[in-house]
Amino acid sequence: MSPTTKQTYDLVVIGAGPGGYQAAIRAAQLGLHTAIVEKEGTLGGTCLNIGCIPSKALLESSELYARAAAGLGKHGIKLGAVELDLDAMMARKREVVESLTRGVQGLMKKNKIDVYHGRGRLRSATLVEVRGETDADLTTARVLLASGSVPIALPALPFDGKRIISSTEALALDKVPERLLVVGAGAIGLEMGSLWKRLGSSVRVAELMDQIVPGADKKSAMLLRRALEKQGLEILLQTSATAAEVGSRSVKVTLEGKDGKQTTDSYDIVLVAVGRRAYSEGLGLDEAGVALDECGRIRIGEHFATSVAGIYAIGDVVGGAMLAHKASEEGVACAERMAGVAGHVNYRAIPSIVYTWPELAAVGLSEEAAKAAGHEIRVGQFPFQATPRARCMGESEGAVRIVADKASDEVLGVHIVGPYASEMIAEAAVAMEFGATSEDIARSVHAHPTLAEAMKEAALAVDGRPIHI
């Protein structure tokens, strides 16, 4: 047995996802002697290894396959029979992930951050025990907890990793399921449903709430639902899964609608995508005295401080949106505060994205949330159908919606359903970061022809003066 390594640091980060590794880099840039602890064999966390990145790689590949199979004829491009090579698609996904994880490892080396692969556990506010590839006891002035989250299971549909699966397994199936049931119509459920539908699955989506992407702007969610149903996804709202019987080749699942009517059908695969929960097990939080909230998340106060002096927490393991970029911004801001540098996160301007096609991207308040917050509002909407670039692309689904305060004209929220909405939303986030009005966006010159012209037109529509409708 090798001896336990003993080292002393200014900061030890537990968890090497986007929040943790970016916090470590920023801390090192600011002169803190930093170590990072990761229980998995590679860095990057859920996002890079089994979440954001592999899903986007497969979504991109599946969209190209779908276009080649059925979408290029209208452009005058004729192809013979298009065949799917799922093994090659999965291999490309792995190559993308592996190259990026190597990149994160290189960033640790570049910034002189010590990496420990093993499970990190608090023994006190100043001692982190690591047990894994290398056993180590790390004395530190500060600890940052960035342990992330894990998928939520349902009592009626416990994960078995084969027939009833989470997003992790959905990104690594070795064949296209003939019939796929997705339970949950949030971002993960819709993305995975879209992915496998493009590749040939018959996909049914069951959602407990009365709209897809619960919490999203209702009219935008309706636009996305309409587009996805055109693509062949069957979407059942106000529907829950109440029972399941797993067989050797299929799963029988009973679904119950809002009227109490039950139906039972068989599926090759059932994907449960009803959300994620904070991952805080095994961190020694009880022994260290770190307080949790009623949902099992770590409680934090000002500048990400937990209930124990010297211990901080960010990302999915604390409250707020479970988004990689939210965790990253928190990690950077937290490290800056530790080093005595001003750092902040504007939670009003954090975008969220559903990477279906068309995409749904949003930042700020929905129309419903703005009204609930007491705002009198004006809303401007402009359809992509009236945008020349979108028509040239053959992508006319969706619209840009801007929610503005009636009195001040300040932009309260922007919601985009359409092609490359994930890229377009950055303009809205910057606008909101600087407190822009809809008039500011309307008066900004947008190049022609671009998809972004729909943003300008939606801003003009807030004041009732769009040019092209």
Image (cartoon, rainbow, N blue to C red):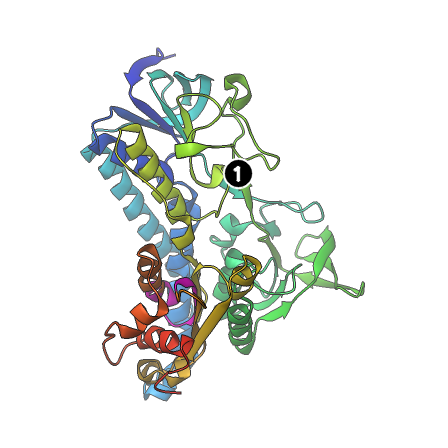
Res. 126 image quadrant: top left
The answer to whether residue 109 is seen in the rendering is yes
Q: Residues within 10 Å of mark 1 (few under 14, many from 20)?
A: many
Which residue is at 23% across, 74% downward? 445
**Amino acid type, callout 1:** Ala
Is 445 left, or right, of 419 in this rendering?
Answer: left
Q: In this view, does 61 lie above or below 75?
A: above
Q: Residue at x 43, y 75 (%)?
A: 380
Residue found at x 48% / y 48%: 321
Magenta stretch contains residue 411: yes
Residue bounds of the magenta highlight: 410-424
Which quadrant of the figure contains the C terminus?
A: bottom left
Q: State yes or no: residue 68 in magenta.
A: no
As displayed, is residue 163 above or below residue 405? above
Q: Choose between 165 and 339: the one closer to the eye.
A: 339
Q: Mark 1 points at which residue?
A: 278
Where is residue 266? Give x, y as percent: 70, 62
Q: What x and y, as percent, mark residue 6?
A: 32, 13
Q: Which of 11 and 309 is in front in this view?
A: 309
Q: Residue at x 42, y 80 (%)?
A: 383
* SS category of the residue bearing label 1: strand
Nearer the observer, 328 or 171: 328
Q: Where is residue 411 in the image (x, y as percent from the top left)?
A: 39, 64
Total residue callouts: 1
The quarter of the picture where the N terminus appears is top left
Residue 11 falls left or right of residue 279? left
66 left or right, relative to 443: right
Instruction: Tell me where residue 331 sits by quadrant.
Output: top left
